[in-house]
Image (cartoon, rainbow, N blue to C red):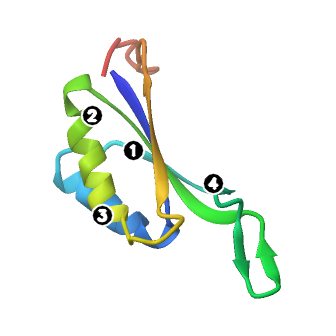
Amino acid sequence: MKMIRAFIRPEKEQEVVLALEGAGFPSLTKLPVFGRGKQKGLQVGPVHYDELPKTLIMTVIDDADVDRVIQVIQDKARSGFIGDGKIFVSPVDNAYTIRTGEVGL
């Protein structure tokens, strides 16, 4: 299993979530977050914005689905401008359902 964490533009959230659901990946968690990437914020004239709003989308999927999920996120989240976001993939050792005690996805 892998956990995918995607930091995307807030205005792309709905499009990405609907595309993941349409591709068969309805389970996810999304959070509003603030941060900065390599560009270290945004300079607009004399004003510098140190932290920018993003949406964090997290999902845990089977190893075989990683490339497909990443492709869906990239296709729907890309605007072509700096600050489109970043995707991180991490291994997940196990998952436990609290109510039933079931192990695995």
Q: Are marks 4 and 3 in contact (CB under 8 Å)?
A: no
The residues tagged by marks 4 and 2 sit, at their Cα atoms, a distance apart of: 23 Å
Counting from the top left corner in percent of width and height, residue 55 is at 53, 58
Q: Secondary structure at mark 1?
A: loop
User: Hey, what amino acid is under mark 1?
Assistant: Leu
Which residue is the site of mark 2? 66
The residues tagged by marks 3 and 2 sit, at their Cα atoms, a distance apart of: 16 Å
Which residue is the site of mark 3? 76
The residues tagged by marks 1 and 3 sit, at their Cα atoms, a distance apart of: 16 Å
* Mark 4 neighbour density, 10 Å: few (under 14) some (14–19) many (20 or more): some
Q: Secondary structure at mark 2?
A: helix
Counting from the top left corner in percent of width and height, residue 85 is at 49, 57
Q: Is residue 94 left or right of residue 69?
A: right
Which residue is the site of mark 1? 28
Residue occupying image coordinates x 73% and y 63%: 51
User: Hey, what amino acid is under mark 2?
Assistant: Val
Residue 37 badge: 4
Residue occupying image coordinates x 33% and y 42%: 27
User: Hey, what amino acid is under mark 4?
Assistant: Gly
Q: Are marks 1 and 3 in contact (CB under 8 Å)?
A: no
Q: Quadrant of the N terminus?
A: top left
